[in-house]
Image (tube, rainbow, N blue to C red):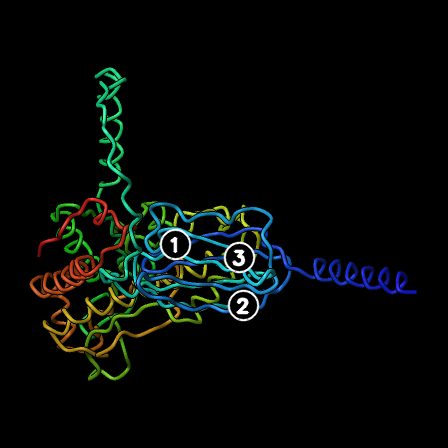
Amino acid sequence: MKKIWKVLFIFVLQLLSVSSYAQQINVNSLKYITGPGQARMVFDLSSAPKYRIFHLENPSRLVIDILNVSSKQPLSQPPASHPLFVRLRSAVKNGTDLRVVLDLKRQVSSESVKDGNHLIVNLTDKGPATPEDKPAAKPAAKAKPVVVKPAAQPQKAVARKVAVKAKAVAHKSKGIVIAIDAGHGGKDAGAQGAHGTLEKDVVFSIARRLKTLIDRQPGMSAVMVRNGDYFVNLRKRMQIARAAKADLFISIHADAFQDPNVKGASVFTLSEKGASSEAARWLANSENASDLVGGVRLDNKDDVLASVLLDLSQTATQDASVNLASNVLKHFGKIGELHQHSVQKAGFMVLKSPDIPSILVETAYISNPSEEQKLRSSAHQSKMALAIFKGIVNYFNQRNTPTTHMAEANTKLDM
């Protein structure tokens, strides 16, 4: 009888073991996605997980505990050049859980979300790590005698390598490209002032003056979206900027209103609604999917990852656009009145590029007689162009992001 109970007991334990194993979640892959000041980790799992995330200091670490999870293969490491991560370590915890520890280069804040079988962890750069927060260095090994051997490579081979590297650096340092979009053009005259001034003419003149200022600045060059009085449709304007690999997109306009007393400048960025509709269009359109967003193709990614990549790119782009717009608005306030003292948001088509920071500048109200007169003045057009230029320079001097050619060239812009 005792033998029967013993056999039954062992059988039940085996069943429980098999059941527990069947329910355990597998980690299929871990992907790293980076953007200016942001990073994202995407865990692809066999089913929706339970987890917790917390931070540890001295040294600074991010800890992710995923419950009832196993990984059949080692998790992928972040690239050595990753702006936030030093390395990843993982181990089994409590026999069934997976603990993932990331040693951090910088201070971060984290947010997480479950999207089906994906665990997505978003990280935002909060500044440099303090000396005591940096990951501890490995203990020094005992000193050993060092034998210096002569270089194995001939000098010509070394010279060729140096030349190739110098060529790559020169290519990276080609400079910042700014796309300047003079609004309207050709059959589309835009708004008209009481004295017959056409918006398309004055904004084109301001755009040309801005191009001259940018082209004179070492490390920068400007591309005109239209080079004359002809019509360019709105989405084509975006495509011209993307083809030029522009780092920024500046659209220049002059506003109008039925009340001639309304005046002042405004600066716009893309609204959240406009960004959402454009994201849906990019994901649905196969032509867009094969294009590059933030340097990454979307057509060879699964739907969830493509959505994550596009969202990360758009978020970083919108943040950068607001920063740029704030700098331009500040300088417009020094040369005249502002219609709106804060950055405005709207769904303008030309602002919808998901990976090029874009702003639309309403330089003045052409429907206001005094501002129409200023818009006709060459001297005031130059002041407006200079205000935009100074805003651009301030924007780049405030940023230290590896996605800009200026940062790669380690160039400080002058005003």
- Dot 2 falls on a residue whose secondary structure is strand
Report which residue position mark 2 lands on. Answer: 51
Q: Residues within 10 Å of mark 1 (few under 14, many from 20)?
A: some
For the residues marked 2 and 1, what is the alpha-carbon distance in whole angstroms?
22 Å
The residue positioned farthest toward the left in the image shown: 379
What amino acid is found at the position of numbered circle 3 in the picture?
Answer: Phe
At x 24%, y 77%, the residue is 342
Question: Which one is in front, 336 or 334?
Answer: 334
Report which residue position mark 3 lands on. Answer: 43
At x 44%, y 71%, the residue is 273
For the residues marked 2 and 3, what is the alpha-carbon distance in whole angstroms?
12 Å
- Residue 40 at x, y percent in the picture: 43, 59
The mark closer to the camera, 2 or 1, is 2
* Of the image marks 1 and 3, the number of the one nearer the N terminus: 1
The answer to whether residue 223 is seen in the rendering is: no
- Relative placement, left or right, of 395 versus 18 is left
* Of the image marks 2 and 3, the number of the one nearer the N terminus: 3
Quadrant occupied by the C terminus: bottom left
- Dot 1 falls on a residue whose secondary structure is strand
What amino acid is found at the position of numbered circle 1 in the picture?
Answer: Thr
In the image, residue 320 sits, relative to residue 176, either above or below, namely: below
Which of the numbered marks, if any, corresponds to residue 34?
1
